[in-house]
Image: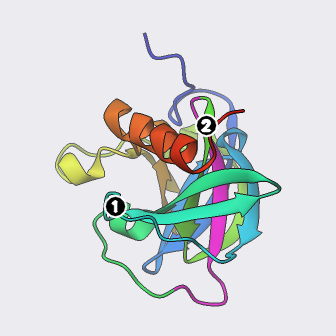
Amino acid sequence: MEHQQSAVGSGTHQLVVFKLAGESYGVDIYQVREIIRVPEITKVPQTPDFVEGIINLRGGVIPVLDLRRRLGMGAQDASRDARIVIVELGDQRVGMLVDGVSEVLRIGAEQIEPPSPYIMNADAQFVTGIARLQDALILVLDIHRLLNPAEQQEMKDLVEAVAPAG
């Protein structure tokens, strides 16, 4: 039923690795459209607390999620290293505010394990795997799980409200 490629599978994977609260996270490179410096973000009232606001990217309105808040880590002021990772979420582009992007890694599927049910809880539903490197662990996120269908619709409505089709 699920048509997205899972982070746990066969072959090799390329992950865009970024930092959040000192920990390494990765998303499949095929889910990433681009990585940009943090521009001015316009706050929008009456949005969920994890929505930082919206940005104008080459004439398009992009909602920006504070990934720290979305993952329950609490907000932090953006540093000089902070970036916005633009991803495709269904038919919509969404920005994820992260503390910094460190690298793109090519790793074998055998290096990615499914997360242990003992450490997983409702807040960790976004983690689809844990990549084991020699000296580090990278939590692999599935961006399609970051927003539930109602939240995805809310992001679409937000964009349409500020940039009506015409």
Q: Residue furthest top?
A: 1
> How dense is the environment of label 1, judged by Cα within 10 Å: few (below 14), some, or many (20 and up)?
some
Q: Is residue 142 above or below residue 69?
A: above
Q: Amino acid at mark 1?
A: Leu
Residue 133 is left or right of residue 33, and the answer is left
Magenta stretch holds residue 54? no
Q: Is residue 166 visible?
A: yes
For this rendering, which residue is in front, 156 or 98? 156
Disc 1 secondary structure class: loop
Q: Is residue 27 above or below residue 11?
A: below
Residue 139 found in image quarter: bottom left
The colour style of the image is: rainbow
> How dense is the environment of label 2, judged by Cα within 10 Å: few (below 14), some, or many (20 and up)?
some
x, y percent for residue 162? 57, 51
Residue denoted by label 2? 92
| Image quadrant occupied by the N terminus | top left
Disc 2 secondary structure class: strand
x, y percent for residue 5? 57, 26
Q: Looking at the image, which residue is at 49% across and 50% down?
A: 140
Q: Is residue 4 above or below residue 58?
A: above
The circle drawn on residue 71 is 1
Q: Is residue 142 visible?
A: no
Q: Which residues are magenta?
A: 78-90
Q: Earlier in the sequence, mark 2 or mark 1?
A: 1
Residue 100 found in image quarter: bottom right
